Image: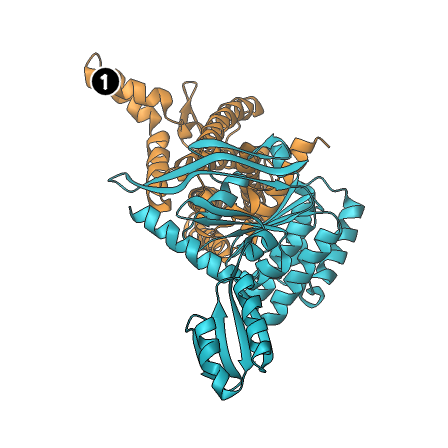
């Protein structure tokens, strides 16, 4: 079953006395299948949080539809299927972590005994046993993020939506978040999360969507996006001095000298293969062959730039 | 328990817990207690009217500081949720937006009830210590004060749905003053302004104003007789009628607040 279906979703904010309009989403479409980890990527202001707030029933779209497990977003039935971590979570600071989780358990209709058992287990799981009965106003940013994760995972919903889950965490905290996400995926949960930490997306996601300027600029499985094309192949070689000129000609003149040896660059693998034969025929040796693929970061920067151009035009 | 009730009560319990841990509340209660203590001193200065002075000033203290507390809690209820962004945590949970508003309101009602009961117990102790007697009339007066606060909180909550806390406090406070002056406004419309457009306007305004004067019984003119809390004119029947009026008005105000909130973008 499809966990999230978004069709032609648009949102415009009207602000201030002069009714100035800001277009946040310009008709986006995507679907998240059950059981996958889906990364929602994009630069600041791309529309990621606006989309998530619509999915969570905090904002109303101006056009299009969004459904969670077939139910319209904002309905109680749809919300009962989702555990949600807001960006920079804010909680009732007078409550303790245990009281906050108890409130969440009650709202999801978890019975008292089961609620207590799950709260104890979740507090242990996010590493807050030492502070569970302390008011949240005394918590650090990292501890609040852990409480946020605990309240998102406590109801054991089939879909978990995380808005920038690693935001403000130190490297250990980020690793813990990654481990939690992978553990939930192993349990068959669907995870939808927004991030601009591309290393997390590369490590965790089955598929990603790249959002920029309120439009989806790219969507697909991560390996499809990353290995669609090899951009360049570098061949590092050494050859006798008299053969270098001929090899330079064979490489179309693009040979540079480094400490490792001479480096020739080619646009495709076939050119590189014929050059390798030429090096060996000339009595040279091949030290290294390095194919260069586009990184997620390069794709991201390219799509973000396209988004900026589209927004300004 | 019905799932709807369970969710509403969960929100109410959290609101109560948060309100009761707010230090500002204790400062306001301390002022009310200081006024009661002052009534003890004034009682000393009066001639054999100690109990009456303590009762009058004590009730006035509960009422006055209760109004300030009701305004403070009511106008901040939604604004605080929006400013501190806690609304992003609660609204995405599986509850309807109206359940959220009703739960928050009931949490404040519980808070006010505890405060009024606590202040009333202290007042009763002062009266007994001064040699006064326990009377149900005083309890009825205190129930009326609580009903007034419950109604005022609902009105404040309604205003806080679309204006800042300062403006909401001004609107709700203004309505409270006007509501306490309903008999004077009615007299004005039926007297000097009778038959004039201004008179009709005042009549129309009085028709929709919350009649807070109903809850203010000391020295009130009810049914042709002057009623005071020191006499038994205020029956349980009157309290029940006033409760129906106050709770109905509060229900309409909360329903309007919920309707406004249900289509609001939480940016």
- State the residue lying farthest toward the top: B195
Q: The orange chain is which one?
A: B
Question: Which residue: 64% across, 61% down?
Answer: A177
Residue B49 visible in image = no
Q: What residue did someone put label 1 on?
A: B199
Across and down, in percent, residue B108 comes to: 53, 42
Q: Would you place residue A228 above or below residue A237 in this image?
A: above
Quarter of the image where one finds residue A252: bottom left
Say which of B103 and B137 sits in front: B103
Say which of A260 and A154 sits in front: A260
Across and down, in percent, residue A28 comes to: 47, 39
Left or right: B90, with A121 as reference point: left
Question: Which residue: 52% across, 71% down?
Answer: A234
Left or right: A309, with A99 as reference point: left
Q: Would you place residue A242 above or below residue A88 in this image?
A: below
Across and down, in percent, residue B8 comes to: 62, 36
Quarter of the image where one finds residue A3: top right
Q: Which chain is cyan?
A: A
The scheme the figure's colours follow is by chain
Say which of A229 and A19 sits in front: A229
Which chain does the numbered disc 1 sit on? Answer: B
Quarter of the image where one finds residue B53: top left
Residue A73 visible in image = yes
Across and down, in percent, residue A100 comes to: 64, 52
């Amino acid at each position: 079953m499809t966990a999230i279906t978004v069709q032609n979703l648009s949102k415009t904010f009207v602000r201030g006395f002069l009714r100035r309009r800001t277009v946040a989403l310009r008709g986006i479409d995507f679907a998240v299948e059950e059981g996958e980890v889906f990364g929602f990527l994009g630069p600041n202001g791309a529309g990621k949080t606006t989309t998530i707030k619509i999915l969570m029933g905090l904002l109303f779209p101006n056009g299009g539809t969004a459904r969670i497990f077939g139910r319209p977003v904002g309905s109680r039935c749809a919300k009962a299927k989702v555990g949600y971590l807001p960006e920079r979570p804010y909680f009732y600071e007078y409550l303790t972590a245990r009281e906050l989780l108890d409130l969440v358990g009650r709202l999801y209709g978890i019975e008292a005994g089961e609620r207590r058992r799950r709260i104890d287990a979740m507090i242990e799981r996010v590493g807050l046993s030492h502070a569970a009965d302390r008011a949240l106003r005394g918590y650090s940013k990292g501890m609040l993020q852990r409480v946020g994760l605990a309240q998102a995972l406590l109801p054991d919903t089939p879909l978990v939506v995380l808005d920038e889950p690693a935001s403000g965490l130190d490297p250990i905290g980020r690793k813990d978040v990654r481990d939690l996400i992978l553990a939930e995926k192993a349990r068959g949960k669907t995870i939808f999360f927004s991030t601009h930490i591309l290393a997390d997306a590369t490590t965790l996601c089955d598929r990603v969507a790249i959002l920029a300027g309120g439009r989806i600029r790219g969507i697909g499985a991560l390996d499809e996006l990353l290995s669609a094309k090899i951009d360049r192949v570098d061949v590092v070689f050494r050859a006798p001095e008299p053969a270098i000129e001929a090899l330079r000609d064979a490489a179309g003149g693009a040979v540079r000298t480094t400490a490792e040896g001479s480096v020739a660059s080619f646009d495709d693998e076939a050119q590189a293969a014929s050059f390798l034969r030429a090096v060996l025929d000339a009595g040279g040796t091949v030290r290294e062959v390095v194919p260069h693929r586009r990184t997620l970061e390069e794709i991201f920067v390219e799509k973000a730039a396209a988004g900026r151009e589209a927004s300004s035009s | 328990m019905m799932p709807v009730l369970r969710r509403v009560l969960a929100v109410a319990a959290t609101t109560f817990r948060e309100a009761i841990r707010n230090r500002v509340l204790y400062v306001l209660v301390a002022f009310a207690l200081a006024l009661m203590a002052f009534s003890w001193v004034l009682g000393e200065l009066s001639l054999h009217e100690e109990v009456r002075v303590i009762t009058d000033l004590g009730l006035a203290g509960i009422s006055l500081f209760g109004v300030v507390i009701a305004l403070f809690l009511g106008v901040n209820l939604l604004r605080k949720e929006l400013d501190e962004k806690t609304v992003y945590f609660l609204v995405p949970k599986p509850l309807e937006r109206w359940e959220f508003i009703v739960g928050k309101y009931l949490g404040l009602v519980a808070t006010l009830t505890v405060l009024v009961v606590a202040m009333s117990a202290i007042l009763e102790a002062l009266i007994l210590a001064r040699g006064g007697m326990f009377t149900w009339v005083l309890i009825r007066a205190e129930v009326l004060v609580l009903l007034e606060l419950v109604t005022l909180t609902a009105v404040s909550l309604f205003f806080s749905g679309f204006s800042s806390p300062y403006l909401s406090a001004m609107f709700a406070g203004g309505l409270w003053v006007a509501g306490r002056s309903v008999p004077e406004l009615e007299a004005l419309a039926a007297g000097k302004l009778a038959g004039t457009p201004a008179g009709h306007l005042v009549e129309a305004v009085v028709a929709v104003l919350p009649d807070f004067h109903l809850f203010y019984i000391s020295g009130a003119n009810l049914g042709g007789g002057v009623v005071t809390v020191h006499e038994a004119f205020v029956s349980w029947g009157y309290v029940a009628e006033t409760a129906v009026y106050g709770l109905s008005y509060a229900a309409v105000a909360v329903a309007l607040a919920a309707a406004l909130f249900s289509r609001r973008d939480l940016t």
